[in-house]
Amino acid sequence: MELREIDNESFDSFAYNNERAHFMQTSAWGKVAMKRRQKVYHLALMDNGEIKATALVLEKKILYYSIFYCPRGFIIDYQDEKLLKIMVEEIKKFTKSHHGLYLRIDPDLILHKLDNNAEVIYEDEDNLSLIDNLKTLGARHKGFTIRFADSSNPRFTFRLNLDSDLDDIFSHFHPTTKNILKRNNPYNLKIYKGSREDVKDFYKTMEETSKRKEIVLEPYAFFDDFYTVLNEEGMSDIYVAKLDVLHLKEVYRQKEKNLLDELAICTSENASSRQKKKVNDLNDQLKKVQKEAQLVADIKEDELVLSSVITAKFKDKVWVVHGGNSDILQFVNANYELYYQVIKDAKNEGYRWVDFFGAEGIIDKKSSLYGITLFKMRFGGDYDEFIGEFDFIVRPLMNKIILTLLNIRRKYYIRKAEKNK
């Protein structure tokens, strides 16, 4: 067997016909990586002209050397130990011959299924054994990281199966989600698939979310390239939830008027005892409505984008990869309406899964990302944990030296930034 580069069509065909196909294992994702000035290799392990495994490998230069990354791992039968051993040996040779320090993989393989308290309810014994097998083949496992930022791609996710009908899918949503969606979009949000022009508004919501959740934000060009390149391949959509502010102001005028009218009846001389008991509750409702109405009244724009997401699509899955929400008017719950539209569209378009792409492996109310995990959990999908990241280090000494130098440089710039403050 030999490892060599193949054409995009053959590469993508092999990926599509694999049961664990992932959008990050396609030539289209390679095109996104090239926009970030990474060199891309479409590698295949060949046996007498037949493809046995593939790897999308991205190269990033570090000084004289390079680091290599195979997003979501090889497309291979990981349980075929002989085949996997050959693939690893060949990929390590490739990495070393291209001045590499190491090659990293993070396979899309589920280790555990978790309950809503992040406790293990199922363990895949084959994938657990695979961790030891990869270590035997020379991989350094980066461990069972918990936090969102501790790995190249999220090690936890929520995945919603769409095989049953929409009513059944809806019935498994969290009560909070069901109650919000049963109101049937009372604020008349406009939810639609947008175009490249909508990336600007999407980015504004991402800026607000990243600041609120303390997330490092990629530059605008990354999201523009992500959507544009994949959309041209039929592999991405951008969804927008836009609010008609004038309509919302009218909604709140009517809400306040209705509550005042009801209070007038309940506090009149002719009010029944039952009506009088409602006064305190009505006053509380009125205070809440007036507070929200003031927030709405302060808005100068006629329209506002409150929530937006960019998806990726391949074979039988839709991934909600990037999403942002505005800081204001969160009580409108635009993100719930938006995600439900993604789910309905995925179902109607024949996809089997929606992957909400990323969560933490702990239910920590003190975490700035707790709300993100809770929100995704409320759509009733499987809470999945992947096996993690593995580094095949082919130049141990030089890798250690360069990592030390980079760490020194990073600390220098941190101290410099703090001094400038």
Image (cartoon, rainbow, N blue to C red):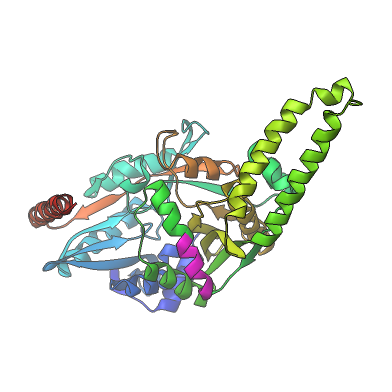
Residue 184 in sight in this render: no
Please tell me whether residue 328 is drawn above or below residue 382 in the rendered image.
Answer: below
Left or right, 246 with respect to 101, comes to right
Q: Nearer the viewer, residue 14 or 216?
A: 216
- What is the tally of numbered marks visible in this picture? 0
Residue 142 is situated, as x and y percent measured from the top left of the image, at 27, 45
Residue 360 is situated, as x and y percent measured from the top left of the image, at 42, 41
Q: Main secondary structure of the magenta part?
A: helix
Q: Residue at x 39, y 51 (%)?
A: 211
Residue 189 in sight in this render: yes
Q: Which residues are magenta?
A: 196-204
Residue 145 is situated, as x and y percent measured from the top left of the image, at 33, 41
Please tell me whether residue 346 is drawn above or below residue 42 in the rendered image.
Answer: above
Outermost residue, top side: 273
Q: Nearer the viewer, residue 89 or 292?
A: 292
- Which quadrant of the figure has residue 58? bottom left
Please tell me whether residue 264 is drawn above or below residue 12 in the rendered image.
Answer: above
- Which quadrant of the figure has residue 300? bottom right
Residue 104 is situated, as x and y percent measured from the top left of the image, at 27, 56
